[in-house]
Amino acid sequence: MSEWLQCIGCERRFEASEIRYTCDCGELVNVERDAMPDRNLFDARLSSRRTIDKSGVWRFREAVLNVDEREIVTHPEGSTRLYERGGIFFKHEGENPTGSFKDRGMTVAMTQAKRLGARAVACASTGNTSASLAAYAAQAGLRAIVFIPAGKVASGKLAQTLAYGATALHIRGDFDAAMQLVREASDRLGIYLVNSINPFRIEGQKTIVWELLQDLEWNAPDWIVVPAGNLGNTSAFGKALREAFDAGWITTMPRLASIQASGANPFYRSYREGFTTRHRIAAETIASAIRIGDPVSHRKAVNAIQVTNGIVEQITDEELMLAKREIDEMGIGCEPASATTLAGVKKLRAAGVMRDGERIVCVLTGHLLKDTDAIMRNVPSERTIEIDATMDAVKRALTGA
Ligand code: F0G
């Protein structure tokens, strides 16, 4: 099976072994391949005990990356749970090894980095990509450098990133400034860039969708709902669905719903204008993971919405924090950005866009413990009661007597 890079604009092709994130015409590139296997192959691997088959990414390897098995850098990752609560499915990508969906793309990008002989890898990040990069670089034996917006990353994510051994450059600016800077630095300093602008990241993240389809025994849901920030996931989901449909793995096409925070909504603004304009804004939201005003994968994400007859919605910080509390109180939990999904579902149901009886899968992108500050600001104060170490005090606290 052969693989190549292909411009999403002019369709020019490049070798897969070339270090390239964009075409000479300026558009992004995708990884494309000439054949897809039968889905039964993936189902057969579910009973295997081999690490490579247990990885929810590499179980789909023929459709992810054509590579010698011995070259694969895998934790393993993926194989996350699909919960059903209150008639909605939740695919919990916070159950990946570093607590976010980023591990799915990182295992592929890091495998490619090693094949290309990279010595150092870098990304700009709101925290999850940096934690994932640091963990996989540690495994691969590569130097990890992360560009993060100073003071704007949740403490759990920053601690993880440093603990795994990365060097953190705290950029005095927002995520979008860090993103621009890391692109330039990678070009000039010969560092391999593993943001989702890297097409191999997208190949790994496709498996979120394929795995949830497999969880549902390939009965496609009506909707797949995903938070939207830098738009890597939206892009990956669109590509995954197109490929699954073309390969005959599913016979109906789910609709994608990409949800943005209203203070960080450049993609929503474009959607409302029929994608005639690409917006760049100064972003602000409590969901620091998606505080992004100039998403790099804009054009790929537009394709994703169009190919799935999808929609883009926005919700307020209040709506997303309310939804987060609901998800937390189901005993599942997620970080704020992930809760945009349930908040979006509620809004879209109220508007009659999503109808009763439709099967909906929300993708929870990050673990509850990633952002504990957001929790402590959000839980009702009556849940925390400090008392003397006496039985009387316990009784008083629990019964009010
Ligand atoms: N949810 C979480 C928990 C994230 O960390 C991110 C992105 C998203 C959703 C949005 O996904 O960018 O593919 O649209 N986090 C990046 C990071 C930007 O640096 O960790 P997207």
Image (cartoon, rainbow, N blue to C red):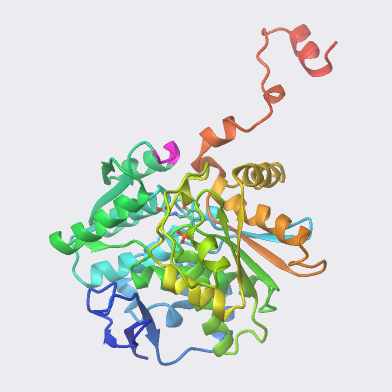
User: In the image, is residue 332 above or below residue 216?
Assistant: above
Apparent side of residue 260 relative to residue 218 in the rendered image (left or right): left
Seen at 29% across and 49% down, the residue is: 147
The picture places residue 50, in percent across and down from the top left corner, at 46, 70
SS assignment for the magenta stretch, majority = loop
The answer to whether residue 88 of the structure is visible from this angle is yes
Is 106 on the left or on the right of 393, as rendered? left
Residue 301, x across and y down, in percent: 48, 71
On the rendered image, what quadrant is the C terminus found in? top right
Q: Quadrant of the N terminus?
A: bottom left
Q: Position of residue 70 (x, y in %)?
A: 31, 73
State the residue lying farthest toward the left: 189
Q: Which residues are magenta?
A: 152-156
Q: How many marks?
A: 0
State which quadrant residue 213 falls in. Answer: bottom right
* x 39%, y 85%: residue: 32
Q: Is residue 368 left or right of residue 354?
A: left
Residue 49 appears in the figure: no
Task: Name which residue lies at 58% across and 35% down.
Answer: 375
Q: Nearer the viewer, residue 38 or 266?
A: 266
Q: Residue at x 31, y 64 (%)?
A: 110
Residue 172 location (% of width, % of height): 28, 40
Q: Nearer the viewer, residue 270 or 108?
A: 270
Q: Is residue 122 above or below residue 373?
A: below
> Relative to 301, is 131 above or below?
above
Residue 297 lies within the magenta run: no
